[in-house]
Amino acid sequence: MATLRNLTGYGPRKGLIFDGDESKYELWEVKFLGYMRLRKLYQIFVPPADDEELDATKNADAFAELVQCLDDRSLSLIIREAKDNGRRALGVLREHYQGKGKPRIIALYTELTSLKMAENETSTDYIIRAETAATSLKAAEEVISEGLLVAMALKGLPASYKTFSTVVIQREKQMTFAEFKIALRNYEESEKTNRRENAKDNVMYVNQKHSGQKFEGKCFKCDKKGHKSADCWTRSEKWCNRCKTKTHNTKDCRKTKDSANTAAETQTFAFTVKDHVNRDKSSGADGSRANVVFGKGDAKVKLYDAS
């Protein structure tokens, strides 16, 4: 930031000195033209009407104001081609920094298509980078649709914005870039609010845990009141209700298993046996002998165990 001396003598006027950075030219020109409007020289820099006669004195004054706001490199572009001609000088700068040359257009397209939000970059700065590239392309008479700009900005968002991206993509009506910016800002505000609420809940839980306040509910591990299952002192203890010992759990008790086996031995089981009994039959009508089923019925079968 540099200080421009107000020629009226009423004190300094602050203005941004253009440093030759192409990406900042558009912003600088807007500020400079605003300053020229205050200096009553704005009409020198706007396109003239057909019957307008340019005031040579004011045009030279405009050039004098302009050169006070330029770095040496930018000044070198105009001193020979547009000396004392403010209107022409600004046109030369605009053509150089916002020209329509093919290499510049390719560079702008590359910047837009490879757009990606940096790790510590705010969404505001990220959106401004996208808009700057798109505006520069439009100034070069390239057609950049709203949908393309939204798609490029959406593609460059990090994985933490996956939910937001899904909602935008699934919308039936296509977003304008202005709507996209508002939606992104609202999403970020909602996420910040949720994080604050979660942090608040965690702090309240910790404070309650260490405040000595007794928990009135019941532990589902030991079925006792006064503590939660996460704080249960019995969660790592073994206990057998049958043997009254801590060496093992009830479900692993050998006595319990032996009782189950004994009960199984005294049980009665029913079986159904199905089979065919074949026997020889006298020769058939053709005089041959054949193994055929003689009859079908019920049979009694006895089963014996090891005892």
Image (tube, rainbow, N blue to C red):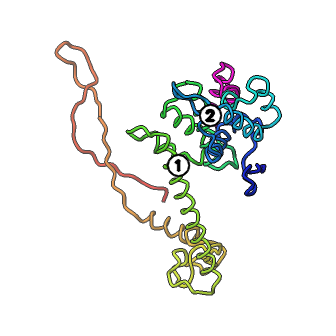
Left or right: 208 as drawn, with respect to 75: left
Q: State the mark number for residue 45.
A: 2
Residue 111, magenta (yes or no): yes
Residue 151 in the image: above or below residue 229: above
Count of residue discs: 2
Q: Is residue 138 visible?
A: no
Residue 192 appears left or right of 69? left
Kindly state the secondary structure of the residue where label 1 is placed.
helix
Determine the image quadrant of residue 247. bottom right
Q: What residue span does the magenta drawing correspond to?
A: 92-115
Label 1 CA crowd tier, 10 Å (few <14, some 14–19, many 20+): some
The picture quadrant where one finds residue 175 is top left
- Earlier-in-chain disc, 2 versus 1: 2
Instruction: State the image coordinates of residue 11 (x, y, percent, origin top left).
Output: 75, 57
Q: x%, y% of residue 58?
A: 67, 36
Q: Is residue 212 above or below residue 51?
A: below
Give 121 or 178, whichever is nearer the viewer.
Answer: 178
Q: Main secondary structure of the magenta part?
A: helix
| Magenta stretch encompasses residue 11 | no
Per the rendering, the mark at residue 184 is 1
